[in-house]
Amino acid sequence: MRSTPKSMRLHIGIFGRRNVGKSSLLNAMTRQQVSIVSDFAGTTTDPVEKPMELLPLGPVLFIDTAGLDDVGALGALRTERTRAVFDRVDLGVIVCDAGRWDAFEDGILEELRSRDVPVVAVFNKDDLGAPDAALLETLAAQKVSTVRTVASENTGVLAFRQALLDAAPADFIENPAIVSDLVGPGEMAVLVVPIDKEAPKGRLIMPQVQSIRDLLDGDAYCLVVKERELRDALGRLNRPPKLVVTDSQAFLKVAADTPPEIPLTGFSILFARYRGDLVAQVAGALAIETLQPGDRILIAESCSHHPIADDIGRVKIPRWLTQYVGGKLEFDTVQGHDFAVDLTPYKLVIHCGACVTNRRAMLSRILKCRQAGVPVTNYGLAIAYSLGIFERALEPFPAALELFQAQAGHKG
Ligand SMILES: Nc1nc2c(ncn2[C@@H]2O[C@H](COP(=O)(O)OP(=O)(O)OP(=O)(O)O)[C@@H](O)[C@H]2O)c(=O)[nH]1
Ligand SMILES: [Mg+2]
């Protein structure tokens, strides 16, 4: 895995009184004994930093702080070290225990607010006491999301993850590049766009348009062809393109017509990275290997287009997967913004490229699947897997490729 420079990590500061369970919460999140925990108030004395990959958020740096003493709230906040932490966090977590939130916690909230830092309030030791409804309302009115945890029992950790995801600043969540970073300035990508009966009249679809725009923004250029003309078009270039990107439905033909030394992927795989979590969704695709005839699969679409005769989600993916598994599978479909489905009957969720939603919404869905213990992948990844060109389509993405190869190696 590539290491992320510290400055690129979302800095999450954990603040609160002594002994409320700040260090326990950090340990529960990391599943490691990062910070020493004890029932002696004042256990943590210096800020403890823990870099980690926090699914599905990405690279973060947790900073566990010394308990800010409860005498003279703001006075205590004036200690130099703590102030330095306030100044460098992108997101603040205020931990209190047994539902106790008063002027002291409000003081921390003020400090973070004055720096425009989003805040998550954690009511830890929920086993010993819960916050009252009026308090929760007051915090909600201030746009502070609240979570209840029992850190010592690892309870509420997933809800805490979701709250961090909800509160994280947009510029951290939204990926800057769709494809231009894989191509580079002055270099070329070839985009393969089949014009079949599924293609809307008179225009291109969102992922294609956005990819073209992203290449232009990145000072790269592109050639857009249908799959039939690809071989001829590649033959005319005096230097190979950096990348070929195809609509997933044309994967087989495009793979056959693209020389093996030219990297190849699909729009939908680019969108797994741009709008979702590529590594998590590659891990989800690996679950196709364990599918059995009779298993139930959920096809999820963010938008609500009218399905046509040869619809990708309703006809093509079910057909390819059924062929791969070698027996009948059960498919259900959900459409639109609502993802309030009971996921427990499903062995796999296959999501569209999510071109009409934002990344935070897609990451929430991935988290929801994770919470339910159901693997989640996307259209392009599922297609590439069931057509047997998964490895090739992942070549431009080292971390994802590594994950696949580890499993392939494991299988023997
Ligand atoms: N009952 C209960 N005990 C908890 C919970 N979380 C943590 N504890 C206990 O509370 C005590 C304090 O936990 P710490 O994680 O050290 O608290 P802290 O906020 O880091 O404390 P300082 O470093 O001293 O500021 C320990 O004995 C924990 O085991 C919880 O949810 N419920
Ligand atoms: Mg501590």
Image (cartoon, rainbow, N blue to C red):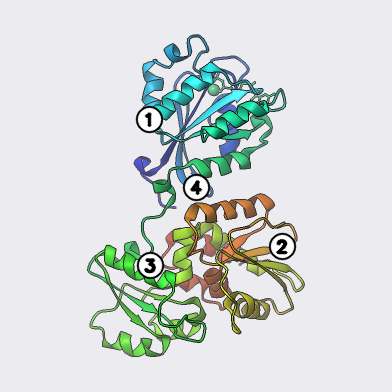
Q: Earlier in the sequence, mark 3 or mark 2?
A: 3
What's the CA distance linking mark 3 and mark 2? 32 Å
Quadrant placement of the C terminus: bottom right
Q: Tell me the element at label 3.
A: helix
Say whether disc 1 or disc 3 marks the residue closer to the N-terminus.
Answer: 1
Note whether ligand 1 is within 8 Å of mark 1: no
Q: Is residue 26 visible?
A: no
Of labels 4 and 1, earlier in sequence is: 4
Check contact, mark 1 vs mark 3: CB within 8 A.
Answer: no
Q: Which residue has dot 2 on it? A: 346
Q: Earlier in the sequence, mark 2 or mark 1?
A: 1
Q: Tell me: 123 left or right of 4.
A: right
At a point 56% along the width and 74% down the height, the residue shown is 383
Q: Nearer the viewer, mark 4 or mark 1?
A: 1
Tell me the kind of residue under disc 1. Arg
Query: Is 26 above or below relative to 43?
Result: below
Q: Residue furthest right?
A: 294
**Quadrant observed for ligand 1 in the rendered image:** top right
Which of the numbered marks, if any, corresponds to residue 278? none
The residue pinned by badge 4 equals 57
